[in-house]
Image: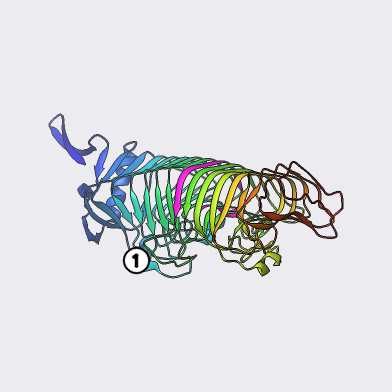
Amino acid sequence: MKVSAVCAVGFFCCSFAMPALGAYDVREYGAAADGKTLCTAANQKAIDDAAAHGGGTVHFPPGRYLTGTLWMKSNVTLEIDAGATLLGSPNPKDYPEKLPKVRSYTDRYVRQALIAGEDLEQIAIRGRGTIDGQGASFHWKEYENRPYIIRFVGCRDVLVEGVTLQNSAMWMQHYLACDRVTIRGVRVFNHVSYNNDGLDIDGCHDVCVTECMFDSDDDALCLKSTLDRPCRNVVISNCLLSSHCNALKMGTESNGGFQNIAITNCTICSPRYSKPTYGRDTGMGGIALEIVDGGTLDRVNVSNLSIDGVAVPIFLRLGNRARPFTPDGPKPAIGAFRNVNIHNVIATGASPIGCSITGLPEHCIEGVSLSNLQLTFAGGGGPELAASAVPEHAEKYPESSMFGTLPAYGFYCRHVRGLRMHNVRLQTAEPDGRHAIVYDDVADLALSGLEAAGTPAGPALLRLAEVQRALITGCRPIGPLGTLLRLEGPSTRQITLVGNDPAGAGRMVDAAGTVPKDALSETGNRLHRREGIQ
């Protein structure tokens, strides 16, 4: 709001406008709240005036304000009242292109946004109102001329709080190479165009995302690294997420990697109010961690997730798409994937695909711990799937469906070192003729407290192929079972079974002829008859 002040200098009087308590009402600058009159110039003048006075709050009272791109300034807050809606213009010409100084792969996507800023500090968007991008007016697959709603690049001390964000033409919000970002109490609904992500944190440091709701067609909450700067020191907590693709994702772009990430106390559910443009009706993935363009994923803790109706609850992937983040940049080397803990996850209504943890030959995922998991899958897989080959697909785009329906209804684990699984319960809604878990080229495995469904006439509950140094303790099937464990491969060795209780199983161990005779040792297992490798 502007007020007038009068001063006397000699015989002359002058009047001038000055900010009242640092507040700048856009209506005082000529913005019409009718939702039809383009107010870009008026809105921008309010922002510029606030910045010129050292900072302040640009206020949008109740009403509908049609606008093109607004360029944020340091020390400025946009305050959007309850009952106020900031409407993005449906005309692409109202969004000038600007290539930021920070180079990233997103230069190939979009250079436009409704609210944009670079190299700023102390900026905020808050309130109980709504920002609506009217993205249905931009319904084409090409990236050009489809603006984000929010894009901040290289900014420091960013706050987005309380607002509702809806109907973007592209990603909803993109924070690139920013430091100290807080996103709190924000509601996102994004289902009107292609690439409708909910939130993209890209190469940022020191980020907190809490108490938010995301409902999006594409990935809901996505950490990316589309440049050689990692996402580092990120906390995500107390959020509700729904997506036709992935609810919580790191990747696909991973050039700088992901380090020191904590995700906790989140609920994930299948979309209820939309049909998919991408993905599936029920959503593709719950938690998806991916390194495919170089970079290092290290120190990631995920805990206390409740997941319902999502195809694949857990998907971990180290691949080699090796896409450089600049057109003339070198092809990145294969990245690293290590030190991941996933604890306390309950998932129901998962598809028959199965979860997977897959690295590459000579480039293994390392140091993964899974504990206190209760996962229920659709089941229905035939026994022929248990013997199906799984291609490496090293260069393929990473997605939880990339290998097709897996030989295990629960977990397929390949090229992994240092895998610990404790207190895991795997169930199926319908009987399934596959293994519960397959380990292929896995070393230093510790499996304890497994409870899993099997079938009397089906394959072994567990299949170990080319596995070294495995300790399997305290495991038991849910219901009748033919065989607990199948061993395969000439390099399989140092497999130890201790204190397992496969009650009702016809056989403890079955082994292929190529498995060394001394590969297995077992003690204290409860079975009607004890059998080793014959």
* In the foreground, 25 or 253: 253
Q: Quadrant of residue 356?
A: bottom right
Q: Main secondary structure of the magenta part?
A: strand
Residue located at (39% from left, 50% from top):
213
Q: Is residue 279 left or right of residue 528?
A: left
Residues shaded magenta: 246-269
Residue most extreme to the left: 11
Q: Is residue 122 left or right of residue 489?
A: left
Residue located at (61% from left, 65% from top):
405
Residue 438 visible at all: no
* In the foreground, 31 or 488: 488
Image height of 492 relative to 18, above or below: below
Residue located at (53% from left, 55% from top):
376
* In the foreground, 340 or 496: 496
Residue most extreme to the front: 528
Q: Quadrant of residue 3?
A: top left
Count of numbered marks: 1
Give the amino acid at mark 1: Asn
Q: Is residue 161 left or right of residue 65?
A: right
Q: Can you give x and y, in whole percent of width and height, for residue 478 in the image?
A: 60, 53
Q: Which residue is mark 1?
A: 91
Image height of 165 relative to 280, above or below: above
Badge 1 local density, few (<14 within 10 Å), some, or many (20+)?
Answer: few
Query: Considering the numbered disc 1 on the image, is that residue within a helix, a strand or a loop?
Result: loop
Q: Can you give x and y, in whole percent of width and height, for residue 92 in the image?
A: 38, 65
In the picture, which quadrant includes the C terminus?
bottom right
